[in-house]
Amino acid sequence: MYRFYYFDVSLELEQDTTEISAVYFKNHVMHLLNILFGEDGASTAVDVLKYDELSRRAILRCPSASYVKLRSSLTLCEKFNNIRCVYRIRNSSPCLLSLLNTSRGYNHY
Amino acid sequence: MLCPEVWNFSPPACNFKFKRGNFNELKTQCIDLIDLHHFNYLVSVVLPDTINVPEVITDALNEDCDYYRVEDIHVSELVNKDFIEIFVKRGHLIILSDGTNIDTDDCVALIPSGHLVLSLNRQTYQELGLEGKPSFFSRSKPNRYVVQVDLKEQYFTPGKKYYNRVQHCLKENLQLKLNLLVAWDPPEEKICPSSVAAYFSSRGHKVLLCQPRFSRQVSYNVKVPEFFLGDNGDDDDALELIEWLGAFSIGADLDSGAPDNFVNTYQCPLETNDVGAAAHLQWTGYFTYSQIHRLFDRLRQYVLQRTSIPWISLYVQGFADSPVSWGLKEHQFYTNGDNNYVLFLHPTGNYLACSYISPNKRPKSKTKK
């Protein structure tokens, strides 16, 4: 019934580097899908709905059938341009409104 | 030869429920959606074609919505007879453990119906000694148990066997001290809601006052989807509207999407109208259902006055780690802990309600053991 899954991810690098634009970010995500799932995996329609260059945090959208593939590709990512990195998936949901905020880790006081 | 599955991985199942009706007609009301959802974390309101939002709407969750964080309190304090008589049996009290994860830690919740819900790991449950049920989400290999105690029951009084047993087990067998979020709606206006904080403070616990956080944003040149809120609406169109609402609320790029754009191909599939400005209000904190109901009533009155507005939306997000979602329905955190609902209100009185709960099915392992 639901067509898309949404991710709130941030890219963390071992060393600081020049700014990564949205195009390079998206290119890297497609590259990760290619590594794990080949050309067919890399043909998944992933959209970067929002991207912040400073924090390297993005909201991604993918078809729900590709959710597991995209999540596993992001999890198993090792390097970004030969710099060790990790994708921290802060939240994922089939409802985009859920990514507004998460109560886990919220400091009430 | 058995081959592992390497290609078709199904996503976690999810549960969108839609309801349509007219909020002026009693039989098609959506009040249950609001009144049974006890633990509300985030509230977001979007008002298209609006620049100045009336204070009566912003004040609905800015005033009289203080709540308290009681630190390092033992669970047995919640079955104290004085506490039950003064706060549980009168007014509406909600309590939720703060900083505990529903999938890994022991969690506690108290809902206005008087039920104390303990969601415990297997070891804690076996040490506790009270009767409970295995969690619905780990039925085959239980590693989580849920204990429910009805504090409003007549037989739950000191001197009765059941009360003595519960109190003894919680005091002696449970070495669990938690931080609790507490909010109380008193039965009468002349009673101050801070009485509950004064009670815990008098018992020697540290109590911190917490207030909701509010943000307001007005965006200009916004193209808002048209949506018909009639009885025979399409659920797929409703999902598209909810997706647009989510994209607008998070500040996503709504303009540059195109089929040939490498970064983002998102375009709203519904017809859109340029309404000029749209206001987005957001509150985060710990809200009771009566506070949400108050906001809903004010939005309802406001939308009936604004005949040209396309719709008004109210989105409420529950706590990801609450043991219950609606009423006493058990909740879990799998890939997310969503228990949210969104309401669209139309000036004609029609509404569309959509509730969403996080997946409650775990994929079954297909390999033989």
Image: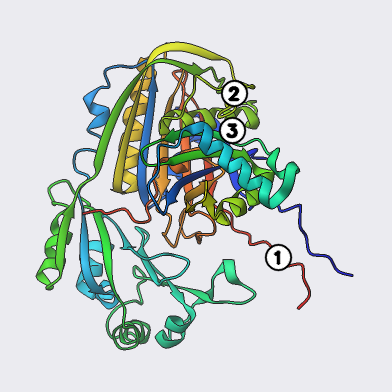
Residue identifier under label 3 = B239
Amino acid tagged 2: Asn
Circle 2 residues within 10 Å: few <14, some 14–19, many ≥20: few
| Comes first in the chain, label 3 or label 2 | 3
Chain letter belonging to callout 2: B
Q: Find numbered disc 3 in the image and state the secondary structure of the residue it sits on.
A: helix
Residue identifier under label 2 = B261
Q: Which of these two is toward me, B348 or B133?
A: B133
Which color mode does the image show? rainbow
Quick check: marks 1 and 2 in contact, CB under 8 Å? Answer: no
Q: Residue at x 52, y 44 (%)?
A: A7
Question: In the rendered view, does B137 fall on the left or right side of B282?
Answer: right
Chain letter belonging to callout 1: B
Same-chain check, marks 1 and 3: yes
Chain letter belonging to callout 3: B
Residue identifier under label 1 = B364
Q: Find numbered disc 1 in the image and state the secondary structure of the residue it sits on.
A: loop
Circle 1 residues within 10 Å: few <14, some 14–19, many ≥20: few
User: Is B272 located above or below residue B181 in the figure?
Assistant: above
Distance between mark 1 and mark 3 Cα atoms: 28 Å
| Comes first in the chain, label 1 or label 2 | 2
